[in-house]
Amino acid sequence: MDGSVQARYSHVTTEIREELVEGLTAIWEDALEARRRMATGSPVAVLDALLKGSQ
């Protein structure tokens, strides 16, 4: 039996990948919104841009 990561996950379909990306994106957006409610800015440039980018 091939124990490589590729062998283990090569059966994942495009639909499953799309569902995973959608789910993770929703979690990310919820987390970013929760952070925005704490403070609308950040001294970290990348986070600051994200916080101000999609209000």
Image: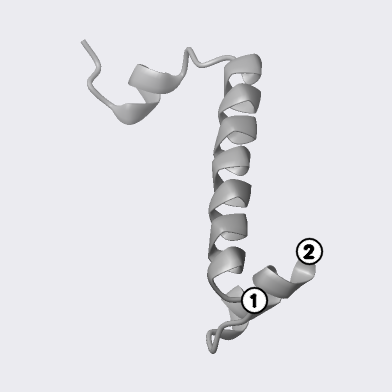
- 46 shown above or below 25: below
Q: Residues within 10 Å of mark 1 (few under 14, many from 20)?
A: some
Q: Secondary structure at mark 1?
A: loop
Task: Give the amino acid type for the residue marked by disc 2 in the picture.
Answer: Gln
Which mark is on residue 55? 2
Q: Judge from the rendering whether residue 38 lies leftward or rightward of residue 15; answer left or right.
A: left
Give the quarter of the image for residue 19: top right
Q: Tell me the residue at 67%/69% (across/down).
A: 50
Which of the pair 13/34 is nearer the observer?
A: 34
- 33 shown above or below 44: above
Q: Tell me the residue at 58%/32% (across/down).
A: 23
Q: Position of residue 7 (x, y in %)?
A: 36, 19
Q: Position of residue 14 (x, y in %)?
A: 64, 19
Q: Position of residue 2 (x, y in %)?
A: 25, 16
Q: Position of residue 15 (x, y in %)?
A: 65, 16
Quadrant placement of the N terminus: top left
Q: Are marks 1 and 2 in contact (CB under 8 Å)?
A: yes
Whichever of labels 1 and 2 marks the residue nearer the N terminus, that label is 1
Task: Give the amino acid type for the residue marked by disc 1 in the picture.
Answer: Thr
- 28 shown above or below 12: below
- Residue of label 1: 40
Which of the pair 21/55 is nearer the observer?
A: 55
